[in-house]
Image (cartoon, rainbow, N blue to C red):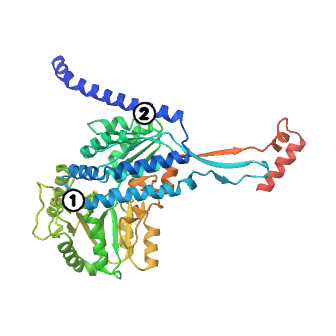
Amino acid sequence: MNQAAETLSPSVAPEENASQQIASMLAAAFQKQRQAYLADSVPGLEQRKEDLKTLKRMLTENLDDIVNAISEDYGNRSRHESLFAEVIAVTDGINDTIKQLKKWMKPQKRHVDMTLYPGAKNRVIPQPLGVVGLIVPWNFPINLSFSQLTGAFAAGNRAMVKMSENSIALSRLLIKISPRYFPEEKLMWFEETGGVGIEFSQVPFDLIVFTGSGQTGRAVMASAAKNLTPVVLELGGKSPAIIDPEFPLEKAIERILFVKQFNAGQICTNVDYLFVHESQREAFIEKSREWVKKHIPDINSKDYTSIIDDRSFQRLEETLEDAREKGATIINLSGDQPANRETRKMPLHLVLDTTGNMTVRNRETFGPILMVLTYKLPEEVIKYINGQDRPLALYPFTNNKELCQLYIDRIMSGGVTVNDALFHVAQHDMPFGGVGPSGMGHYHGHEGFTTFSKLRPVFYQAGFTSMKFLAPPYGKFATKVYDFLVKFKS
């Protein structure tokens, strides 16, 4: 026993020491920002606009380095996809926030019960929460960090950002360039070196925003609960699409496959599985092959993004193999072109004839794999989807308004795009977030500003108040007034 203890001690102590060092580093950074917040707790409109403009400059002035760093982390990330999803989406969101900010910051007037409080005023004043913590995944590291920072800075907060272990090149770049634009009292970035995420979620932030898996989201929420820190969770899930047989099939295919191949399918709001009417199954397969032949003739092209790491690539291969072994029909839409393990490039695949014991049925694919289910009636679709966890997104393809509304009314999801996929997320004046297992809370637009703010209710009493006549000892007058109010309000 003593010998075993001696053997274990050297390996345990360094881990504990490293954990303590990480915790101390994060605590010092948090206290620095907390003290800065207490010294200047409500930045004015002009300061917030300047912070947003600086955030945009940080991105645009380092655009090539940022895009290259993301590609390095991926192995290969399409430059066009980075420009569209990371740069254009972020700068557009910042511009929109700057335009709307003055209106968002105005105190809101609220109704006053004039029976007892004549002359008084009610206001709801949005004020900064303080110091917020952002835990950002690897799939859209700039979009998700900068869009959240947009809401945080618009609301007047300070922020600490923990990046993914799969975004090392980008993390180091942001850590290097950030001090040129923001003092540490305003913004700090942290690389994941092992154990940082665990300690980060235990910091007593005023708000934590986490984007990632449901399993990790539960752990973050549990850690935050120890400090009663509120959380916003964006957790993904299996988002379905449904093609109405009356909707133009080719149009549906081109829109669905465009988003499915985008970022090699590594998007939390991507189409995870698809319902096709049983009469269109073969036509769907054939037209999907035609689309891929035209738009992705070679998966080894620099325009086609790599799977993020070997573990994810292996998971996708195992998902296909599991389905194949259990009797599913697997269709490589690139024909004979195989997956490239060296570059982690994987063709788009359709998986049909699935059963409930297959991995593809039960786990978010997060890659270029599309499970296809057939149906006869809309009720079959509704019953199946409602039997699963509530998805982050829902994508009905139909020009039938009644059918569209049926799906929206009967299937709860985080958000909806009708006759396309993904693009509700890009609307800056719409909230973004999940529901149930796909997440909680919102950011983007005004809802993002609200999420990062304390909506503080303030009651301004008038110079004269009738309450002075209703104080104890309660006499006949008070009794008559209270009895009257009970009857009047009933």
Q: Position of residue 322 (x, y in %)?
A: 17, 59
Residue found at the very far top of the displayed protein: 2
- Look at label 2 and name its amino acid: Phe
Residue carrying label 2: 30
Q: CA distance from mark 1 to mark 2?
A: 36 Å
x, y percent for residue 101: 53, 54
At x 49%, y 31%, the residue is 35
Please tell me which residue lies in front, 256 or 35.
35
Instruction: Estimate the x, y position of residue 252 in percent, counting from the top left.
Output: 31, 75
User: Could you tell whether 132 is left or right of 358 in the image?
Assistant: right
Secondary element type, mark 2: helix
Q: Quadrant of the C terminus?
A: bottom right
Q: Secondary structure at mark 1?
A: loop
Q: Is residue 286 left or right of residue 146?
A: left
**Residue shown at 48%/61% (left/top)?**
429
Image position of 420 with respect to 154: above or below = below
Q: Check the image and report above or below for 384 versus 156.
A: below
- Please state if 279 lies on the left or on the right of 244 as rendered: left
- x and y, in percent, of residue 199 in the image: 35, 34
User: Amino acid under label 1?
Assistant: Thr
Residue at the farthest right position: 476
Q: Let me know if residue 237 appears in the view.
A: no
Image quarter in which the N terminus is found:
top left
Residue at the spot of label 1: 305
Q: Is residue 246 visible?
A: yes
Q: In the figure, 314 relative to 415: above or below?
A: above
Residue at the spot 83% in from the left edge and 36% down from the top edge: 472
Answer left or right for 116 relative to 174. right
Between 221 and 163, the one lying in front of the other is 163
